[in-house]
């Protein structure tokens, strides 16, 4: 461990209140790096695999919108961090970071952070600090979920919120015209094409029944929110009325045991393969045309 790194971590306001044992674990996992003036740190759309703390110099944060050149949306100076979303969320960089001046940085990778958490649970305090640092951006997300709130209502709401840290496992998100599924460092990209699918990557990332179609439908559903979840084996969701089906057919799981149900078909010829095929099959049987 570089003692200068630990001394720096102890000195910055961002990490004030983080236990010293946790800072030591983090310092041991950090790597120092440097940038020349105008050198790119990462680009919007890159894989988010680490956060960076600025020891010397200044970074510009840029948004690349596709209609013209990059737009400056902020800057990061000594004692501040950039790219912390890599520890909070899986996915791609949401902005570009470039050195405004020559800069020295401390790099903490997501993998190193997770190993530090396993060895020293107090490292989670660092995550809490980073979440608080990101709160201004997260407040904007609250507006999307709850609508415009006055300050008093917002304070009451934030008082009821709590943060939960989930270890990396399965992640699903849209990126342009494709969907991306990630699991244990493997990735699968897919998009619909001519009644089938165009895929690249590791197919086993989504190995559940009709997983591509179901995952795409969830991501494309205009009524879906910002978070899509699938119940893991052994976990049961309840519906809005409080009902559940423990031991069978979970509400909202891609797993095989929760995806297959008995079906009795009489007089329809070949039985429907899926629940969503029942109505079209019945309409065809009775000669009823289907609305587009």
Image (tube, grey):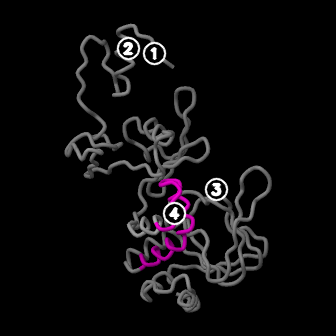
Q: Tell me which secondary structure the magenta stretch mostly adopts.
A: helix
Q: Which labelled disc corresponds to residue 283?
A: 2
The residue that mark 3 highlights is 45
Bounds of the magenta segment:
123-152
Which circle marks residue 150 in the picture?
Answer: 4
> Could you say which is closer to the camera, residue 83 or residue 225?
225
CA separation in Å, label 2 and label 3: 45 Å
Instruction: Return the x and y of residue 59 as percentages of the image width and height.
Output: 71, 74
CB-based contact (under 8 Å), mark 2 and mark 1: yes
Q: Which mark is residue 168?
A: none
Residue 58 painted magenta: no
Determine which quarter of the picture holds residue 259.
top left
Residue at 54% across, 71% down:
109
Against 170, is 74 above or below? below
- Residue 270 image offset from top left, x and y in percent: 32, 16
Residue drawn at x 49%, y 71% is 131
Label 2 to label 4, Cα distance in Å?
A: 50 Å
């Amino acid at each position: 461990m570089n003692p200068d790194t630990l001394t720096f971590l102890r000195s910055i306001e961002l990490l004030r209140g983080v236990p010293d044992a946790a800072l030591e674990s983090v310092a041991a996992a950090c790597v120092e790096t440097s940038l020349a003036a105008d050198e790119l740190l990462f680009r919007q759309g890159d894989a988010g695999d680490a956060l960076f703390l600025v020891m010397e110099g200044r970074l510009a944060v840029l948004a690349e919108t596709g209609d013209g050149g990059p737009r400056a949306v902020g800057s990061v100076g000594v004692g501040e961090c950039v790219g912390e979303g890599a520890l909070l969320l899986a996915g791609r960089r949401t902005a570009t970071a470039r050195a405004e001046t020559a800069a020295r940085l401390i790099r903490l990778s997501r993998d190193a952070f997770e190993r530090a958490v396993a060895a020293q649970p107090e490292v989670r305090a660092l995550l809490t600090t980073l979440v608080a640092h990101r709160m201004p951006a997260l407040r904007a997300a609250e507006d999307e979920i709850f609508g415009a709130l006055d300050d008093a209502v917002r304070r009451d709401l934030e008082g009821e919120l709590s943060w939960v840290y989930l270890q990396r496992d399965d992640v699903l998100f849209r990126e342009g015209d494709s969907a991306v599924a990630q699991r244990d460092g493997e990735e699968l990209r897919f998009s619909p094409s001519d009644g089938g699918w165009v895929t690249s990557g590791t197919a086993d990332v989504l190995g559940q029944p009709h997983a591509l179609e179901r995952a795409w439908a969830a991501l494309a559903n205009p009524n879906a929110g910002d978070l899509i979840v699938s119940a893991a084996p052994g976990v049961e969701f309840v519906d809005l009325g409080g009902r559940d089906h423990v031991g069978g057919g979970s509400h909202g799981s891609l797993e095989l045991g929760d995806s297959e149900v008995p079906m009795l078909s009489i007089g329809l010829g070949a039985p429907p393969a899926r629940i969503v095929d029942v109505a079209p099959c019945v309409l065809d049987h009775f000669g009823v045309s289907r609305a587009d």
